[in-house]
Image (cartoon, coloured by chain):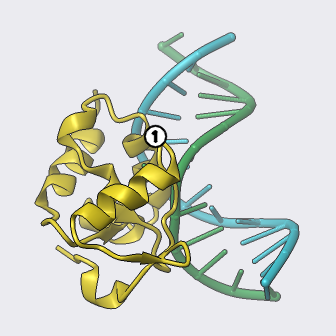
Chain colours: A yellow, B cyan, C green
DNA sequence: ACGGTGACGCTCA
DNA sequence: TTGAGCGCCACCG
């Protein structure tokens, strides 16, 4: 595996329950502000699935982005953690977002 | 609201 | 080993 991926998962673990992070912020935090896509790639192909809560990662506009196991499941997981999803987007996104 | 272009690291051929 | 395609995106027209 690459160090980049490791960093992604490490960062993912820093996100507290009930909060979400954006691909962009994540990329920026990793030192690659323009590698948002790469982050998504890393999450999707996440070789260590259970330990990396990729469902806490959303698009910068509050959209859900996507999810390997189906967007629907992502929404469910998020709700279980207290993040309300309305209209395919994160409710009160600005308040739930985690910027490290 | 919509489409096209940019950018970056991973995977597979 | 090197090259091209691709993805849970971002941004500007």
Q: Quarter holding the C terminus of chain A?
A: bottom left
* Residue A40 percent across, percent down from the top left: 45, 51
Residue in view at x 21 percent, y 55 percent: A12
Q: Quadrant of residue B1?
A: bottom right
Nearer the observer, B11 or C2: B11
On screen, residue A13 versus residue A66, left or right, reads: left
Q: How many marks?
A: 1
Any part of residue A15 in sight:
yes
Above or below: residue A51 compared with residue B13: below
Above or below: residue B12 compared with residue A58: above
* Residue A70 percent across, percent down from the top left: 51, 45
Any part of residue A56 in sight:
no
Nearer the observer, A64 or A33: A64
Residue in view at x 42 percent, y 34 percent: A45
Under circle 1, the secondary element is loop
Given the image, what chain letter belongs to the residue carrying mark 1? A
Q: Which residue is mark 1?
A: A69
Residue in view at x 51 percent, y 72 percent: A63
Mark 1 neighbour class, 10 Å CA radius: few under 14, some 14 to 19, many 20 or more? few
On screen, residue A75 versus residue A1, left or right, reads: right
* Residue A38 percent across, percent down from the top left: 45, 49
Residue in view at x 22 percent, y 76 percent: A98
Nearer the observer, A18 or A42: A18
Q: Quadrant of residue A49?
A: top left
Above or below: residue C10 compared with residue A56: below
* Residue A78 percent across, percent down from the top left: 31, 63
Q: Quarter holding the N terminus of chain A?
A: top left
Nearer the observer, A3 or A18: A18
């Amino acid at each position: 595996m690459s160090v980049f991926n490791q960093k992604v998962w490490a960062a993912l673990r820093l996100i507290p329950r009930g909060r979400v992070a954006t691909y962009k912020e994540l990329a920026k935090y990793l030192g690659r502000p323009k590698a948002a896509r790469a982050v998504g790639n890393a999450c999707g192909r996440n070789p260590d699935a259970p330990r990396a809560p990729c469902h806490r990662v959303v698009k910068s506009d509050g959209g859900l982005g996507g999810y390997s196991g189906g967007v629907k499941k992502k929404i469910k997981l998020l709700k279980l953690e207290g993040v309300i999803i309305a209209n395919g987007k994160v409710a009160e996104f600005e308040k739930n977002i985690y910027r490290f």
